[in-house]
Amino acid sequence: MAKIDFTTGPRDDLWQLLEAFGLRPSQSRARENTTVNVSWMVPPYLERNELPAYGLKFHLSGSVLNAVILMRTVVPRLLERQYHFKTASSLEFITMLNAGFLGITQVGKLVTVYPRNSDELRELADLLVDLTEGFDGPFVPSDYKLDARGSVYYRYGEIASEEGQRDSACPEELNFEDTRTPVAPVPDWVIDPLRHRRHENTRATLPENLVVLDPLRQRGKGGVFRALQIDTHRERPDVPRVRRVILKEARRLGEVNRQGVDARDRLRWQYRCLQALEACPQFAEAIELFSVGEDLFLVMEDVGGRNLNEYLLDEPYTLADAYHILREVHAAMRAAHSAGITLCDISPDNVLIGENNRISLSDLEDSAGVGAPLQGGLGTPGFHPKRVEGELETGIARDYYALGAVAYALSDPHWYRRCREAVGDMAIWWDRPALPSHADVHLRAVIEHCLVEPTDFHLEKAERALAALQAPLPSPAGWLVANA
């Protein structure tokens, strides 16, 4: 995945601390030039030519809860001995890192330390475990945990290799690619002096009546899976009933925010919201909430179909389809508001299109009570108002903004595709070109009155624009949005 590159860098407490230690933004080497990437900070003495092309490297896991104190503890000792390392530059960047926006394998990696030789490797293993004892952080999916104490992980991979450079330690008959998968953090052919210190992460197993079919999505907060549930609690327990369900996982410290709210807290909240909205057909049935070890799981009705993101990228659709989607999302939003809930994350990823064109909304763990603080999720770029002084709007106007953004995406799927392809470029989601003159007048009105900053929002105007979607389709009724 491409790097998220802050062009100026958020100067928060962590940035200022690292700057005070003498760290500077790292330099990313490209084919023809060197660019500054302020997502990461490095010591001034770091030289790529002193590092091996491939080798073992350490990652220190943490979160926004302990990042500053972790850096205060670790960075001075690394500088004192002139070890080579990089650190995440800001709390905002750590939030995105641990959400999995740079890839699920990057979760937890606040500090990366690069041993230059086997002696440094052993020295650092002891030092880092001692320094991080008592610290806690998310599990790092791509690595082995080093020792039960501390929050140190390690793996084998690229360190200072040039593009296309082969790993000279790899046997000739093999072709090593650093894919950062959790299958083999250290390949079998690598001599690993730390093998005996690996701390096995023994995760508890799911109940026997749940069979996972396939993963649908992975993020720092956990995974979403399609599964089968075997229900024997019936009048005839000898005849099991099997149904397809969605299984949502919430990991301990998954996407934890600065108030200490993590994925498990948000999943408990989603369960409560779904129970409150059980009479609304636009929301899935909440079947069961249970714990496995330190993680939490929610079993939900599988409404089937595809999400709107896939629909926008792959499917041609009519104006009638667009109206239907917006009407149903609007109905779901109104039902939630009536129940005292603001959804806070209406986006194409969370709008599901099932059998018989049933529209439903998912991912209510980022929702909040009307007027209450945000539960802690980042939301989806472009589908919430821009941040104002680091804060996210949480009121009803935020949901209408998201509905307007969905209407814009339905009006211009080419723009939406360009944004999806620009991995790592968050700003592009708020850079919307003017709609073409032939764009539907009713969709244009919804966008005009919903897709506005909260200070400019007028509920009555937005509702009038949305009510027009109930009217007969304008001519030509078969207007098609072409995705080719």
Image: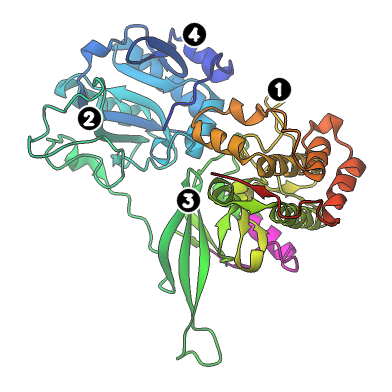
Mark 1 and 2 residues: CB-CB less than 8 Å, in contact? no
Q: Which residue is the site of mark 3?
A: 217
Please, what is the three-letter code of the amino acid marked with disc 3?
Arg
Dot placed on the residue nearer the N-terminal end, 1 or 3: 3
The circle drawn on residue 389 is: 1
The residue at 43%/35% (across/down) is 108
Q: Is residue 293 visible?
A: no
Above or below, 298 relative to 13: below
Q: Which residue is the site of mark 2?
A: 56
Q: Is residue 264 visible?
A: yes
Q: Residues in magenta? A: 270-290
Gap between marks 4 and 1, in whole Å?
23 Å
Say which element carries label 4: helix
Gap between marks 3 and 2, in whole Å?
29 Å
Query: Which image quarter holds the C terminus?
Result: top right
Residue 420: x percent and y percent?
A: 53, 37
Q: Which residue is the site of mark 4?
A: 20
